[in-house]
Amino acid sequence: MRFTNNFIPTLKEEPSESEIISHSLSIRAGLIRKVASGIYSFLPIGFKILKKIENIIREEMDNAGALEVLMPVIQPGELWQKTNRWYEYGPEMFKIADRNKRDFCLGPTHEELFTTIAGFELNSYKDLPINLYQIQVKFRDEIRPRYGLLRAREFIMKDAYSFGASQKQLDDDYKSMFEAYCKIIERIGLRYKIVEADTGLIGGSSSHEFMVLAENGEETIVYCDACGYAANMDNAGFEINAYKDDNTKSEKELIEVHTPDIKTIEELADFLKVKNSSIIKTILLKDDDNNFYAAVLSGERFLDISKIEKLLNKNLEFINEQNNILKLPVGFVGPVNMDKRVSIIADYSVFERKDMIAGANRENYHIINVDSFRDFKADNWGYFSFPIKGDLCPKCKNILNFEKGIEVGHIFKLGTKYSEKLNARFLDINGNLKPFVMGCYGIGVTRLLAATIEQCNDDKGIIWPESITPFKAVIIVTNMTDEKLKNAGEEIYNNLISSKIETLFDDREISAGIKFKDADLLGIPFKVIVGRKYLQNDIIEIENRSASFKTDARFTEVLTYLKEN
RNA sequence: CGGGGUGUAGCGCAGCUUGGUUUAGCGCACCUGCUUUGGGAGCAGGGGGUCGGAGGUUCAAAUCCUCUCACCCCGACCA
């Protein structure tokens, strides 16, 4: 491809809207342009990359025996009303009406449609199992679209749905999808982790998320190098590996200290010159019936309110100025001498600890030398915080690691949830009508594009992995007005493309610096430089983007080099 | 949704507080010519916006007021 025949609007300056590297680079490299919040156009280079990702996915899906189909974007509301998701999905679903005011939606996912078609057309256990997939646009009216392609409202996803006659067939399909997803991400060449996940709105039993590791990931992954355990932060098991004091009681008496206007853990730790972990953090909560709870945990930890909600089986909210009907001195509350109307829910991070600091339940006072065994009694003990650095693997007790990730794939065992609701059944070997045992498997195509940039970049731009790079090489002729250089560039270009090496020929009559900068920004793996050295000694330079090393080559060696690397 | 912020040329921004001195300005990009051509060139000339939209105040509005739309950021961490 010649640069002058292409449409690659690169930008020197940072777009003001972008918050994250992949967003900025995908705009600057001319891959995408925004149309509206969370809605993007793909320009030629972006689209080219997209197709490469799609092809890898398509090949691996086909290898796994899945069959490609194409379902409509627009789906009848009636179908979604049958599964009740018309209401459950809420405002996140783009709903539209036709001229006769019939309800439709722009599909956020396709369980209803796939299940319906399977219900019509697959009648016998002999037809099963079968796995159908499509690569299609999806719509989700996100509360807050952001990070460019990472959280868009219109995006491309590959979604697959398997229909089995038995749990065994589902298990097999699930396994083969699991493996296909690993291959897809590995072929693209990304570092990733697989975590067990909640099934959420889609429902079902087993579920795994495929997380591409990246600093700006929205999820924190907790994992163990020793045994391979991995989970999302909010789903992670862990054991506390710290501060259980010896089990004698504290010798020291409780003393109130004056802490004027010091309400936060940070301020208190600073004021008393102690670590956050020596402070008892007390968070006030209330349920819908106005029962109050005090969650008590070690000062450096963060409360996971959903764990307490699960324990109590109630919805909880934090106490603020408006709902503090007990008029507790927020900022100075603590478990010692707590108001009797408040239940104490204690985290094991403060179990059997002494000489701690807590709120005194009196404005502008804290209390020191608190012994969690001696000085208060909890109504419940449990694990109510998120894991932090230093905590141990729940399986093998090694130290846990933490890394940020981007969810690019998610697979579920749905079971019969949809097939029952949509009456999608087949006849089994005994002539009984049975609902399909289903699985569904999604992988974000546009999100993979963004995740790849997020993982593969430096301060100069994108660094494409070979698997999905838009071009393998870019020919930079430093001076297009020089006939010798120009002709050499043309000839190399012809050689490379006739050998099917995807090549961008930067034939613009502009200064060389711009070409170098654009090549780096675009992330093309190899630069073939025809310039000064060629004029002097007929030497072509080949520069590698990721390692930024240069190799000298003879004219005829360029093709061989690129074929071999 | 709640809170905050921003809309001025394709992109990035200044001007707005204290209305008139701006036929609205700067950098990049773009066009023409010449010179350049190894890490975002130089000189000269040039095109492009009516200041998100609507309404209002005023002799006069990018600037003040009202409404509206769009976009961006933040949202338990007061324990």
Image (spheres, coloured by chain):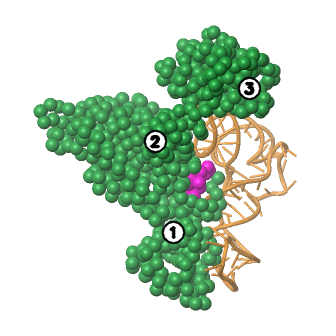
Tag 1: residue type?
Pro
Chain drawn green in the picture: A
Q: Which residue is mark 1?
A: A525
User: Where in the figure is residue A359, as x and y percent of width and height?
Assistant: 71, 20
Chain drawn orange in the picture: B
**Seen in the image, is B47 located left or right of residue A405?**
right
Disc 3 and disc 1: Cα gap in Å? 54 Å
Q: Which residue is mark 3?
A: A263
Labels 1 and 2 in the same subunit: yes
Residue ID at (68%, 23%): A354
Q: Chain of mark 2?
A: A
A279 shown above or below B22: above
- In magenta, the rendered stretch is A17-29
Which of the two discs, 3 and 2, labels the residue nearer the N terminus? Answer: 2
User: Where in the figure is residue A334, as x and y percent of width and height?
Assistant: 68, 19
Mark 2 and mark 3 in contact (Cβ < 8 Å)? no
Q: Which residue is mark 2?
A: A229
Residue ID at (48%, 19%): A313
SS of the residue under disc 1: loop
The answer to which quarter of the image holds residue A116 is top left
User: Where in the figure is residue A435, as x and y percent of width and height?
Assistant: 23, 33
Disc 1 and disc 2: Cα gap in Å? 35 Å
Dominant secondary structure (helix, strand or loop) of the stretch shown in magenta: helix
B70 shown above or below A288: below
Residue pushed farthest top? A340
**Seen in the image, is A170 located left or right of residue A533?**
left
A307 shown above or below A48: above
The answer to which quarter of the image holds residue A523 is bottom right
The answer to whether residue A304 is magenta is: no
Tag 3: residue type?
Lys
